[in-house]
Amino acid sequence: MVEYMGPRPTVGIHRYVLVLFEQKARFVDGALMPPADRPNFNTRAFAAYHQLGLPTAVVYFNSQREPANRRR
């Protein structure tokens, strides 16, 4: 759907969540549009709209960037 973008937090700690769903049926071309915005993406609404059911696997990680004046 969208190209992978590695973690790029501005400042502070950010949590990234990757969710894997099993598709019950193929998506018809053009029926699946990429999200307009990455921040605040609603995974539950997306899964419900596309009838994906429960997640098969989930992983999350934290990424942190310190302000320039605190870098080593």
Image: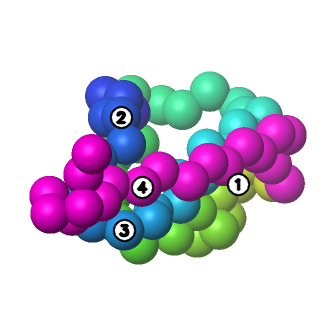
Image quadrant holding the N terminus, namely top left
Q: In the visual, does 57 lie left or right of 10? A: right
Inspect the magenta stretch and tell me whether residue 63 lies in it.
yes
> Does label 2 or label 4 sit earlier along the sequence?
2
Q: In the visual, does 4 lie left or right of 36? A: right
Calculate the distance from the C-alpha at mark 2 to the C-alpha at mark 4. Answer: 12 Å
Q: Kindly report which numbered mark, 2 or 4, lies closer to the viewer in this rendering.
A: 4
The numbered disc on residue 64 is 4
Give x and y (percent) for residue 39: 34, 66
Label 4 Cα neighbours within 10 Å, binned few <14 / some 14-19 / many ≥20 = some
Q: Could you tell me which residue is drawn at 36 percent across and 68 percent down?
A: 12
Identify residue type, mark 3. Gly
Q: Could you tell me which residue is drawn at 45 percent across and 63 percent down?
A: 14
Q: Kindly report which numbered mark, 3 or 2, lies closer to the viewer in this rendering.
A: 3
Identify residue type, mark 2. Gly
Which residue matches tag 1? 51
Write down the region rendered in magenta: 54-72
Calculate the distance from the C-alpha at mark 3 to the C-alpha at mark 2. Answer: 16 Å
Q: In the visual, does 36 lie left or right of 22? A: left
Which residue matches tag 2? 6
